[in-house]
Image (spheres, coloured by chain):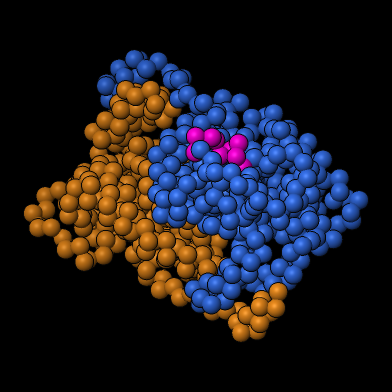
Chain colours: A blue, B orange
Amino acid sequence: MAKKSSKAGPVPVTQPLSELLRLPAGTVHLGELDSAATTGFEGGKSDAEARTAALEPELSDLQERLYAAGRSGEVDAPKVLVVLQGMDTSGKGGVIRHAIGMVDPQGVHIKAFKAPNEEERAHPYLWRIERELPAPGMIGIFDRSQYEDVLTVRVNSLVKESVWSKRYEEINAWEDGLVAAGTTVIKCFLHISSATQKERLAARLDDPTKFWKYNPGDVDERSKWLAYVEAYEAVLERCSTQRAPWFVVPSDRKWYRNWAVAQLLVEHLRALDLAWPPAGFDVAAEKVRLAAT
Amino acid sequence: MAKKSSKAGPVPVTQPLSELLRLPAGTVHLGELDSAATTGFEGGKSDAEARTAALEPELSDLQERLYAAGRSGEVDAPKVLVVLQGMDTSGKGGVIRHAIGMVDPQGVHIKAFKAPNEEERAHPYLWRIERELPAPGMIGIFDRSQYEDVLTVRVNSLVKESVWSKRYEEINAWEDGLVAAGTTVIKCFLHISSATQKERLAARLDDPTKFWKYNPGDVDERSKWLAYVEAYEAVLERCSTQRAPWFVVPSDRKWYRNWAVAQLLVEHLRALDLAWPPAGFDVAAEKVRLAAT
């Protein structure tokens, strides 16, 4: 993750983005991380859109291999979970539309977590999350996640500090279990500046085709910006683990953000090194049976 | 739907495909419906792929309007349900990947109905279907559907004839209720020939990257081809209603099939004539509030 003060030249694109954006251990000051950076990318908007689209064939091939592994019935078939977090207007929906939208929708399970309903509130906070985890061979997408239970819950004091403060370690242990059971967890923090959020909210108020995206509550939440920054810094500092690290995706530029998440997904799928499942039947015998029909 | 014997010239593309493919009332003989036709389309594979891709911007705009209507909280916001049925290898998955895959996945709910599990079998057959109906503003996609209860269930005698024979009228009444409550129902029968199915199954046995798609049970089901034809003919004759007609999509050519389903979806979305929802708040006042942050 590039610091604003960095004087380094362009990063060679041969270095995996998952290394470049992976949050290093240590104290996090969001204000020092450049939300307008284009880490690991050289070029502008049209280059990024072309390079994002160019990822589609490989993404498609890798996803189909993953799906095939899931269908082959092996109990340990891999699963992938992309967690999207970020301030309002940071572009969680845009990433799903433009990056995840390149993947065969049959292999994707998207879940947007809203304020919990009555039944969900009657259970431990991870209960509703567990139920939406991807099945073998599937890519799960969380638009918000378990982290809301240490973000909005903390900022709005929805439970006591003695309760939420224990959750960082609980979430780490829970994610550790997920990874151990074969889920690749890709946690993306879509990082925008306060000025970017203001611009994007203003754009929604200027365009009648975007009124439906605006909610007066957005301004109320915006007034708590600093409290959210603090809560996100705690999440990033305490929950970026070896097995399930956070990736900080500079998201002031939508085209970079979309490319970066697609690229992160491709790199993680590649790392699974997925072979096509072998036939679970006698191929020659089946050819004979089919020919006889 | 073109008859094989038709000598008519090319159909002008200005006529809606939903009129051309809509099954007319009367007796259905699948053998007389040309599964290799390209009704309403002039040109070949590359034209079709280009024209399918060219539908994307309008499809995207229409779907966003639908989604916006759903988000605006109006109880009568429209819903769309695409039902995909067809013999094995007819391309239900291909349609979802190539046609439905053009739509923002956040606005799409896909459900593939497999053999019912124990809990599902303990309920009336429409119970599990109801649970997967699209919410307001959503496009639901059924890969198989309630029709399996008069198709595989009938062909394999899973219930008595006195039971399944009542279901045609039950399904009609149930769909009538759906439509009355604001769901646009688009039922697509993906029509392939027996020879096409044989080719596609053989292709799966010839390509190790496709073994996972093959199941020895496919040949068993194929041996019941004529019984399935009869069961489909009964469905098409008895359940193509005024409010929820069947569209017979010639599907021997994948490129035509994908274009046709995308085109049918666009035409039905256009017919909803969706306006952007008005602001549910005071726009000027919100601009002032936002500016003050």
Image vertical order of residue A210 relative to residue A25, above or below: below
Question: How far across and how far down the image is residue A13, in percent?
Answer: 49, 38
Question: How far across and how far down the image is residue B280, in percent?
Answer: 61, 79
Quadrant the C terminus of chain A occupies: top left
Whether residue B233 is visible, yes or no, is: no
Q: Is residue A9 left or right of residue A25?
A: left
Q: Is residue B72 left or right of residue A285?
A: right
Q: Residue at x 35, y 15 (%)?
A: A285
Q: Which region is colored magenta?
A: A13-21
Question: How far across and how far down the image is residue A280, in percent?
Answer: 46, 19
Q: Residue at x 25, y 51 (%)?
A: B48
Quadrant the N terminus of chain A occupies: top right
Question: How far across and how far down the image is residue B136, in percent?
Answer: 54, 65
> Residue B1 versus residue B95: which sits nearer the camera?
B95
Q: Is residue B289 magenta?
A: no
Q: Is residue A17 magenta?
A: yes
Q: Residue at x 81, y 41 (%)?
A: A170
> Residue B163 versus residue A254: which sits nearer the camera?
A254
> Residue A181 versus residue B77: which sits nearer the camera?
A181
